[in-house]
Image: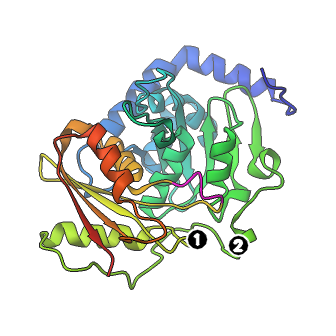
Amino acid sequence: MSLNPFQANPDIAARFDRQQAEIGDRLGAEIATLVAAKARRPEDNLGSIVLADEATILRQSFGLGSVEELMLLALGPARGIARPPISNFFVGAVGLERETGNLILGGNVEFPGTHLGYTVHGEGFVFTRAASRGTTIEAIAIGEAHPCAHCRQYISEFATSRELTLIDPLGHRLTMAQLYPWPFDPDYLGEQGATAGAYDAGLALSANDWPASIADRLLDAGRRAHAPYSKCPGAVVLALNDGQMVAGSSIESVAFNPTMGPLQAAMIELIAHGYQAADIAEAALGTRLGGAVDYSLSVSELLGRIAPGAPLNIVGWA
């Protein structure tokens, strides 16, 4: 067991244990119901979200003193989002959106049959989900407030990460500056880091014969990709059996690894909105064909494992 240099607040831990015993199951069921009500509606982009006004009602109904108490108790239903068929180790994470006060629930995702590097961590799920919504994360609740080194590096890519607060049921309340005091961050390469919003409004697709709905979604996702280091954005659109679509954008790290690939990001959107890999009818990839980073092979490999019957259409950026 690693050495913990940080002091937890035993009052927070005791309060959490008491609340979990008294109201945890009922509160968790209500949160799960709220999240399920928004499932399979990706056009609203509210998958895995507890809205700020819903969070206020929950706090009042269950006598909670703060949104942080609610976030800690929401870790249980967040673990229900996790998909870890390899490790069977379920991780939940709950992020507080800075701009809205909404809560984003997320979990870890593993992909059997391919390499472990495609794994999405719970913290990465929450931050990638926020990026797709054009928001940033002010605070995050996790089982223990010390993300792995992979997650600390990924989180450090986001421009507001130094102000991030991390809380846990053990009673820790820490900042990223405490956990990662001397980060290798975008400043080293003269970049500001990932921010909310689009990055490359001028990005265009080369000729394709897709429906306009897919092409437009792919372009939007490509323009939102964070690719300052390779200049090779990646975007994936997953067309689903019920006619809906979800999309994901690549998010590069200044350390290159960890970078969130576009299909991993699209799978986060898929799971957040209550779908399974079996719901994928076809996929479209926009990438820099022949570029320093070309997602053609990696997306083909991963999609071939998670949805082997779904055709993949690849187009280059113009």
Specify the farthest residue to the top.
Answer: 21
Secondary structure at badge 2 equals helix
Q: Is residue 126 above or below residue 21?
A: below
Which residue does the numbered mark 2 point to in the structure image? Answer: 189
Picture quarter with the N terminus: top right
Q: What is the CA distance from the residue labelled 2 to the residue labelled 1?
A: 8 Å
Residue 284 drawn above or below residue 281: below
Q: Main secondary structure of the magenta part?
A: loop
Q: Which residue is mark 1?
A: 229
Which circle's residue, 2 or 1, is located before the other in the chain? 2
Amino acid type of the residue tagged 2 in the rendering: Leu
**Where on the picture, by quarter, is residue 15?**
top right
Query: Residue 133's spot in the image, x, y percent?
Result: 42, 60
Left or right of residue 120, residue 164 in this image: right
The magenta span reads 255-259
Work out which residue is located at the far bottom of the displayed protein and give it: 202
| Kind of residue at disc 1 | Tyr
Within 10 angstroms of label 2, few (less than 14), some, or many (20 or more) residues?
few
- Residue closer to the observer: 96 or 85: 85
Between 196 and 55, the residue placed more toward the observer is 196
Report x, y in % for residue 268. 39, 46
Residue 208 in the image: state x and y as whole percent. Answer: 17, 75
In this rendering, is residue 222 above or below 88? below
Which residue is pictured at 58% across the width and 58% down the height? 98
Q: Are marks 2 and 1 in contact (CB under 8 Å)?
A: yes
